[in-house]
Image (tube, rainbow, N blue to C red):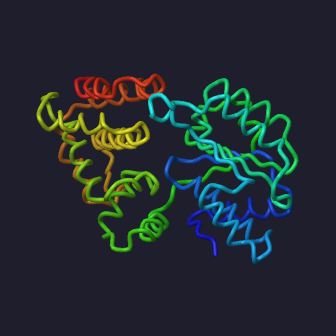
Amino acid sequence: MKKVIGFDQEFDSILNQLLDNKLSNSLLLTGNKGIGKKYFISQLFEEYIKKRVESQQTHHHLSLIKNNSHPNIKILEKEIDEKTKKLKNFIIIDQIRKINQFSFETSIIENIPKFIVIDSADDMNLNASNALLKILEEPKLNTYFFLISHQPSSLLPTIKSRCLKINLSNHNYDNFSKIITISNPDIDEETKKFLYDITNGSPGLINEYEFNEILNIFERLINLIEDKDPFSVSNNDTIKFLSSLDNDQLKIFLSFIKFILITINKIKLGINITKNYLSDSVLKIQTISDKISSDIIQRKLDYLINNENDLFTFNLDKKIFMINFITE
């Protein structure tokens, strides 16, 4: 039985095409970060193995997939820099060259195709993107590329044109609730509604944190926006916390800040947010909407939109970035 929730139609279509040898060699899976694109692909591989491998060998193959050690599957992600011991900002051309070499190698398991997953294609620098494009232009027999993208607009148009595009929509609340409840059976309804609202239905965004911790952080972010003293004790503590996060974690919390700002903006425009949001915790945003002007909201949003990409691209100082945000 498939474990994928919410994408049955897309899953069955790709799996059937793969089984019938009719699938495009290059697929681009798009959708919001955290909705489960990588998990979708891993489950696809598992279902394919179950239908293609003799039953006595299935468990062995599934164990290899679970441990990311299957000889026919390569997953390309940003690597750790040996000098700084931190995650690199980009997927680089050397990594693309290695998967090109992998695509030419003779398969250890001949009756199973080679699968190459790039998570995410948004992280490739220009040289890596151009190198991948050359590979996609001359597809290898029995080799499939799965490109994951949270922001397909950041990809080269020529890469997108070489791929079959599959867009996975945001989860509705029922599916989000089912996904969250699988690993957290005791979670209460209000917390699920809160998480659904602030993540826009993306359960993967909250896997690294305790739910109560996210609720507390949400309150701190509201205070960060509301506080008229940029260097108050509360703000200093929040800035220190945000500055301590790695890039992927900080991206998540910057998305929460943007969520708060956009919600305040909706309230000021006269939009009834009770029709859009389910959680009582999120509705608390209404209490601060009168304490901050539309001009300040727009300036803070503009600051994030105009500077967030440079923060991560050039590895800028996170503390200075956040101080500039609250003083904007």
Q: In the image, what residue occupies the spot 39% across and 58% down?
A: 196
Q: In this view of the protein, which residue sits in the foreground, 189 or 81?
A: 81
Image mark count: 0
Which image quadrant is residue 290 in?
Answer: top left
Q: In this view of the protein, which residue sits in the foreground, 281 or 290?
A: 281
Query: Can you say whether 99 is above or below 59 in the image?
Result: above
Q: In the image, what residue occupies the spot 71% across and 52% down?
A: 73
Residue 217's spot in the image, x, y percent?
25, 48
Q: Along the horizontal axis of the image, is 191 left or right of 75?
A: left
* Residue found at the very far front of the displayed protein: 83
Q: In the image, what residue occupies the spot 85% across and 56% down?
A: 22
Residue 99's spot in the image, x, y percent?
73, 39
Residue 242's spot in the image, x, y percent?
29, 37
Query: Can you say whether 225 is above or below 40 in the image?
Result: above
Q: Along the horizontal axis of the image, is 38 left or right of 58?
A: left
Can you say which quadrant of the picture contains the N terminus? bottom right
Query: Can you say whether 231 is above or below 24 in the image?
Result: above
Q: In the image, what residue occupies the spot 77% across and 37% down?
A: 100
Q: In this view of the protein, which residue sits in the foreground, 308 or 277?
A: 308
Q: Along the horizontal axis of the image, is 30 left or right of 300?
A: right
Which image quadrant is residue 20 in?
Answer: bottom right
Residue 135's spot in the image, x, y percent?
79, 35
Can you say which quadrant of the picture contains the C terminus? top left
